[in-house]
Structure formats: structure tokens, C-alpha cells
Image (spheres, rainbow, N blue to C red):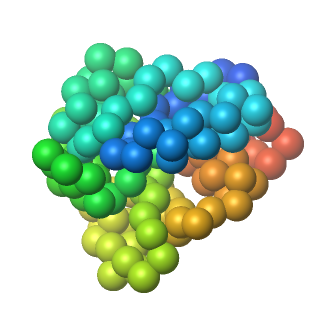
Amino acid sequence: MAVGNKTVADISLLIVDDLSFMRSAIREIAEEAGFQVVGEAENGWDGYKSYTEKLPDVVLMDITMPVMDGLKSLRRIRREYPQACVVMCSALGQQKYIIKAIQSGAKDFIVKPFRPERIVSAVKKAAGVDENGYASN
């Protein structure tokens, strides 16, 4: 969670998506933007476990995944860590999940296919960093 003088370079990010090429694409976008990618997970359960171990500033999580879907993982993370900042990501045509995700505590929602700048702005917003890269307290 953003506090004090946090900048883009201070934002730690966990990427949760069942598709390895999607995790790689998001990692590349995130690292190019200056975020610290602290981990990746391929399902909601592993995402939850990684969150509890790493406590990143922001989680970027897909909704449709095996083992545990993103909404269940989001709810579990937010129940145990109410300060958690989770941005949900899902394919076009799954807009019905937007409301469920926001009601469950998601800070934002990105629809795939996405533009790189949309990921960057969503992560900044969730972490409380403004478009110039500084804490937006």
C-alpha cells in the first residue's frame, strides 16, 4: 500500500495468470515501467500463497484460472489482508465479473486484450502513485 514518498520504482507487483505467455508479457510491461516484479503464480491458490509470503504492493490477477479462480483468491486475500491492492484482469466478454470483482474489493479491472499503458496506469492507481510516478496522497 502506498505511503509517504513511494515512487514507481518502489511498487512491488505480483502477477497471477494461468497463461505463461501472459505472465511474461505483463512482466515485461511492468519492468519496463519500473515496477519491481516480486513473483508470478499460475492459479489463484498459488497467487494467494505468494501474496502471504511476499506482501506485494499490488497484485495483477486473472479471473479465469484452474485450482482457484481469481475472484475466490481475491476474496481470500482481502479477507485476511484488507489493505491488499488487487487489480483484476479478464478477457473481453466477461464484464459480468467486473461488478463481482469490485464488490469483492478489487481496486481496478483490466479487460484483455489490454494496452500496456492501461496496465501501468492501473498498477500506479492501485498503489496510490500518480501519473508522474509519485505518491498521490
Q: Residue at x 37, y 66 (%)?
A: 102
Q: Position of residue 88 (x, y in %)?
A: 43, 56
Measured along the vertical axis of the image, is residue 88 above or below residue 39?
below
Q: Position of residue 121 (x, y in %)?
A: 69, 52
Left or right side of 68 for 4: right
Left or right side of 57 for 99: left
When asked about the image quadrant of residue 134, the answer is top right
Q: From the image, which quarter does the C terminus lie in?
A: top right
Left or right side of 104 for 136: right
Q: Residue at x 45, y 59 (%)?
A: 89
Of 137 and 34, the residue lying toward us:
34
Q: Residue at x 38, y 23 (%)?
A: 55
Measured along the vertical axis of the image, is residue 115 above or below residue 53?
below
Q: Position of residue 56 (x, y in %)?
A: 45, 27
Measured along the vertical axis of the image, is residue 62 above or below residue 85?
below
Most extreme residue toward the right, as rendered?
132
